[in-house]
Image (tube, rainbow, N blue to C red):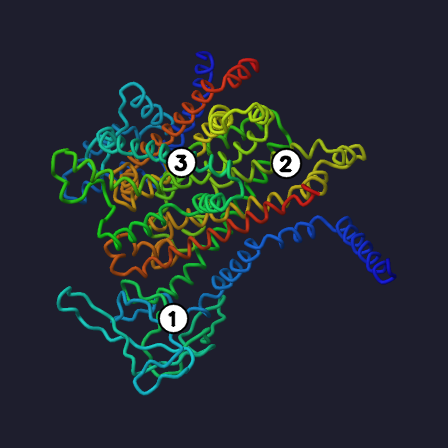
Amino acid sequence: MTASTEVFEEVLVADQADQDDRFYYASQWSLIWWRFRRHRVAMVSTVLLLLLYLLAVLPGFFSPYLPSTRFESYQEAPPVRLHWMDKSSEGGGFIGPHYYGYEKTLNKETFKYEFEPILDNPIRLRLFAPGSEYTIVGDWTSTIHFFGTDVEEPPPFMLFGADRLGRDLLSRTLYGARISLSIGLIGVALSLILGVILGGISGYFGGLIDEVIQRLIDFLISIPQIPLWMALSAALPRDWPVLKTYFAITIILSILGWTGLARVVRGKLLSLREEDYAMAAKAAGTGESRIIFKHLLPGFTSHLIVTVTLAVPTMILAETALSFLGLGIQPPAVSWGTLLQDAQDIVAIAQHPHQLIPAAWVMAAVLLFNNVGDGLRDAADPYSDH
Amino acid sequence: MVAYIVRRSVMLIPILVLISLVSFAIIELPPGDWVTYQIENLRASGIELNEDEAERLVKMYGFDQPAWKRYIRWMRGILFKFNFGWSFQWGKTVNELLGERLPLTLVISISALIVSWIIAIPIGIYSATHQYSVLDYIFTFFGFLGLTIPTFLLAMVLAWYIFKLTEFAPLGLFSIEYMDEPMSMEKFIDMLKHLVLPLIIIGLNGTGALIRVMRGNLLDELKKQYVITARAKGVNEMQLLFKYPVRMSMNPVISTIGWILPGIFSGEVLVSLVLGLQTTGPLLLRAVLAQDMFLAGSIVMILSVLTVIGTLLSDILLAALDPRIRYSAAAAR
């Protein structure tokens, strides 16, 4: 064996030891992070989900128009195509992103309006273009949009097409994301509070109160949720302001949504209470609440996060379903569910399939959350197979 | 066995009481006195209603009495006279309306459950016996999709797509040309064609879950020693598989009915609305929108009771199939 390979082997061994040290000294959270990072689908989904929420936080900036702006002659116009190569007769080269206005003709046979792009007049798009004024937060407004055009009075650029009243579906989908995506988070936050309190009481005190709460959970799990949600939302007056309806819906969703979280809290509390370190803390004279919050809670926070992540899509779906049925968010407020009301009639969809685009967004959000939740579940217990 | 059934049935009573309380709360939930609202409605629609008549209505529905008395009245009507109340919106008894709609709800829900079994169990067996094969990955992926994809949105998209490809609209129970025809072979086939999409979609969430459970259980079972022993003795692989491990891993699958059933009834409501099936789903929506609360409350109650009874039946079936369960339950006493 030559000197150089020896050195090489030594480095390898030292490297291995370093690796081991790194593993043994790492905190639980960095272990979880390392493991989560290895889950490629979950990582990609996390990034996409963050992007989705960015869109939902700044719908005014990313959407070209306001959700209520109507383009009267563009009712149910199909999506406008984005072009890069000049399609007009004299052109032909690359001129950057642009689109063409529509010419509307009445088909004499079907008596339906048809939209044909006018190819001789490319309208160029640019980033950070000025447009109509929108509110960011409170009194803070802006007129800069993510993309737009400098052309005077351009034909509308409706990437997802227009709805029945000639409003831009892309803008409406983005504004809808604000309500649909946030209702998931707030609903789960409320469920989490209910779940931690009731699950905590149940798991920590045990006895009769545990029995009562457990039977209540069994009961809530064993009945079909959608009919119950529908009936509960019937009590909401249709003329309430948007914000009030929004919170009422959130509360209705979390009334039935806390059971899963309470089960996790109770189960984990019951098993961790018997651990040696909990005993030791008790023997050392630590108070009950300090044991729960300082010693027991950190032991299952990761599991709680998993359950929370997997509960969000259920909430988003429930809101979509209720609004779709006309029982949730009421127009003129926009959520993905209210947008899908336009797509209730299959014959209408067959003529204007772009009305289904919001459905694709709901499915994407639900799938992404489930992917992230799956990745978190694999990572939640980093000590499991080491 | 009889003792087990009796004990499980008795345990059902508090749940049934809770369901009836929740349903009654739903009836009472909309703000304002509901009879006053109806009286105003009648007056607005031009029906002459004198004070006596109005008072009689208030008395009839017990609105001069506290809520718990109304609850007892309502429950007495259901338990002893099988009378669920009156639907103002339709001008019919709730019984009559439910009689029209409930059979189809039941047929569709139960068939959806069976369809999800027929799809999931063979796939689960294949995935477990061919672990990490290409098809296993594909099935696992579709199982995941089935678990997560929102069924009523999928119903919309698929119905549109089928309509676009084949000009066949999978809506309602019959095509227009068969609507008024008497039952015939062609009409029956037409009905089956309309039912394929809703049954697969309603059962979809359950199918995804069942594939996972079946695959996991069978994998555990296949690792056990008796399988290795049987294989060592030269038992035919197919015979071995279906005689012991598959039967063993079916038991937990049966117990999943309990948590699949609520999802099936929920899904049935939404999918029926999208696909225009005349079940209790659209009836519930119309009742809720019109605040026809006796009807809405009754539908919620019946769907919940059906779910709970379904769970009970699956528990009994499980105990019948697996003697260990009824003995351990008996021993626990």
Query: Residue B114: horizontal and vertical position, in percent?
Result: 36, 32
Residue position marked by numbered label 2 in the rendering: A268
Q: What is the chain identity of the residue bearing mark 2?
A: A
- Residue A158 horizontal side relative to residue A57, left or right: left
Label of residue A224 in the image? 3
Q: What is the chain identity of the residue bearing mark 1?
A: A
Query: Residue A348: horizontal and vertical position, in percent?
Result: 24, 57
Compared with B249, A118 (above or below) is below
Q: Earlier in the sequence, mark 3 or mark 1?
A: 1
Give neighbour class at mark 1: few <14, some 14-19, many 20+ (Cα, 10 Å): many
Is there CB contact under 8 Å for labels 3 and 1? no
- Residue A142 horizontal side relative to residue B284, left or right: right
| Number of numbered discs visible in the structure rendering | 3
Discs 2 and 1 share one subunit? yes
> For the residues marked 2 and 1, what is the alpha-carbon distance in whole angstroms?
49 Å
Residue B69 image-quadrant placement: top left
- Residue A309 horizontal side relative to residue B303, left or right: right
Discs 2 and 3 share one subunit? yes
Is there CB contact under 8 Å for labels 2 and 1? no
Residue depicted at 41% across the width and 25% down the height: B16
Label of residue A65 in the image? 1
**Residue A30 in view:** yes
Residue B199 image-quadrant placement: top left
Amino acid of disc 2: Lys
Compared with A212, A309 (above or below) is below
